[in-house]
Image: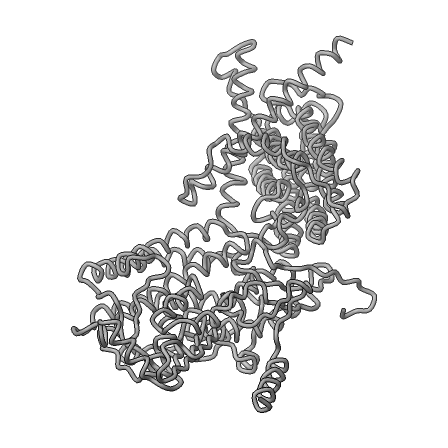
Amino acid sequence: MTDILTRLLSGTALLFLVLLLAILYDGVDRVVHARMQRRLGPPILQPFYDVMKLFVKENIVPRRAVAWVFNGAPLLAVTAVLMVFLYVPMGSLPPILGTGGDLILIVYLFALSAVAMVAGGFASGSPYANIGAQREMVLMMSYEVPLAIVVTTLAYFAYRSGIPGEPFNLATFVAMPVWGVAGWMGVLGLAALFVSLMAVVPAEVGKVPMDIAEAKTEILEGLICEYSGRNLAMFKLTFALRNSAMCAVVVSLFLPWNIGSSLGLTGAWLLVADFLFFWLKVLLLQVFGVTLIRTAFGRFKIWQASQFYWVQVGGLALAGMILLSLDLLA
Amino acid sequence: MSAGSHKTYRIPIGPVHVGLKEPVTTWLDVDGERIVKATVRPGSIHRGIEWMARERNPIQVIYLAERICGICSFTHIVAFLRAVEDAAKIEVPIRAQYIRSLVLELERVHSHILWAGVACYTFGYDSAFNLGMLLREKVMDVLEALTGNRVNYGVGTVGGVRRDLTPRAAKAVREMIQFYRREFQTFLDVVTEDPIARARMRNVGVLSQEDAVKYCALGPTARGSGLRVDLRHSSPYEAYGDLGVTPLVPQDYTGEVFGDVYDRFFVRVMEVVQSLELLEKIVDGIPEGPIAWEPKLPKVLAALKAADGIGWGIIEGPRGDDTHVVKLTRGEENVTWWKVRAPTYANAVSWPLMFQNQEIADAPLIINSIDPCISCMERILVSDARAGRSEILTRANLVERCREKTRRLMGA
């Protein structure tokens, strides 16, 4: 009983903190993006102001929308992504629901929030939202391939190379970085998997060059075209959270090193230092993996994005898979 | 609907749309992402400028003409002034002709950079858009130094120009040329070398050479399809006879013509480079002399009042041929009638062709690719607020109305 209560309390506190950090990182993203374009950019707290404003604004449901799906979709989307953080170990802090779920669950939680957005788009009764929803579905089908390859290859590698712990559990990869276990061929393979996973991130978070479902100059924000007020605020949170969650998962898989113990810290200080270091890594990954990419490129068309994920990224992930398998054989 | 079993959706792009600068509606019948049919419906921004002109004298109309367009404002007044000068047989001093060419080329530079930025924005390349806007500031500053204004320069007058090119302004122009030679290459590289920009523009919105001829495409739209048409070359006006302009077509640089958005983009950015050369020639070669045929406005007005006849002014604007026709009647102070044909009027006809077999994602880019100037184009719209209807008059309607009026006049 006390265990459940502790988890409930710590989970609520953690999710609240994560929410704040994700919004703050969204602000950092916007400022860095602006600075790279030689603009001043908004205040770093602008996303907070946006979300707070949206929460008090009128919530309009279009006449042709299916109201319960339309209103339920944002809630489901934001809840699903928030749940991801309950399964991600942050620094030395073990995941709140650690043993209850694994990588496969995380992948499905991401998919669930995307499906919720698609449902909301279809329920909007607007042709633009309809196109946006179709595009999101096609995009999902495209990036799930490299994503699945990366996740299964890593689990197989962890299982075969004898890393202690459940092969699909994130805590396993955090406890023992995969880079140390692999030979030179394995390191190459891991690098390939890392790059292909990073290529999936922009599509997962709906940022240029993969903001195809929300392309504002083409289909007027597509999916979220009809959303306003509280619902839109929740979608904004969903996008910010997906960005941080995806980067957090990548950090746990590929960059799990901690700083606390090498500084000689113990107890609560160790937890705090590692927690902060973890979020610093997430921030860096967000800046280099999402912000930089979205500054440097334009938007793909949907079939080009599909091709990119099936051929280029999928090929790279497969190459990584083969290299890792060869490494295990050697 | 191409295949009977497929259901097509109708999606409006416009009249107000993020990817468009001005209101125009395009109804797209789409099957999934593919455009099956496109119907362009202009008519949202007609202002009746020509009608307003009939209550004003030519000097007053200059201000109206300048406000036809916010980007090619000087193009419109030069075309109008040339029409008036043609009707009244007024000689423009050489120095004034050079200054007009100078402002026209500066305007071309700023229009093309603006367009290139907006095109990048249309396919989500915000960084290139911002870079373009940043670069454009320089030419805006020079225009301000030269004329005192950033958008509507107010430098043209019947028989010449109102402001001389001072040595300081000439220095600013030279500095600007150097600045763009340094900086503009970055923009060109950023966009033409970028794989995504190439993927978004190549083979999109194709207008073949034959179709460009058949549908009377003009300016960069025609040159993007490989046609060597440029009024600065074929019928030089103002100082262009001395400058030697050759039409800029993509096949001279890349060896082949696709007639797609990429080629139109390429033509426009290369024309900025060409304009820089022209500007240099203008600033170096500008002769001394008066800047107006007659600086005293009452005298000009008197001469215009005495003039009788129809005058034409056709010049190469940043978007294509801009045609103004003016009728002056002896003894009448006001313009009898005035007709404007902006280049978009001719270019918009090829939109439905460009939409064939494209995707929704391309639609705003295709619309923008001819650099449309909707408010310049829209000339006739009949609306009846009480009946709640509005219609655009077609040629057949107009002919019928003309005949009706003639009949009425004959009968009276």
Tell me if residue B257 comes above or below residue A70 in the rendering: below
Q: How many marks?
A: 0
Residue A12, image x, y percentages: 67, 19
Q: Residue furthest front?
A: B412
Tell me if residue B203 comes above or below residue A178 in the rendering: below
Q: Would residue B262 be visible to someone looking at this image?
A: no
Q: Quadrant of residue B92?
A: bottom left
- Judge left or right: residue B204 versus residue B232: right
* Residue nearer the viewer, B229 or A324: B229
Q: Residue furthest right?
A: B5
Residue B45, image x, y percentages: 55, 63
- Judge left or right: residue B36 versus residue B94: right
- Judge left or right: residue B284 versus residue B73: left
Q: Residue furthest bottom?
A: B410
Quick one: quadrant of the C terminus of chain B? bottom right
Residue B246, image x, y percentages: 36, 78
Quick one: quadrant of the N terminus of chain B? bottom right
Q: Residue at x 54, y 78 (%)?
A: B212
* Residue nearer the viewer, B179 or A251: B179
* Residue nearer the viewer, A133 or A253: A133
Color scheme of the displayed model? one colour
Tell me if residue A18 comes above or below residue A7 in the rendering: below
Residue B239, image x, y percentages: 28, 77
- Judge left or right: residue A119 versus residue B122: right
Q: Quadrant of residue B334?
A: bottom left
Q: Residue at x 45, y 56 (%)?
A: B117
* Residue nearer the viewer, A323 or A263: A263
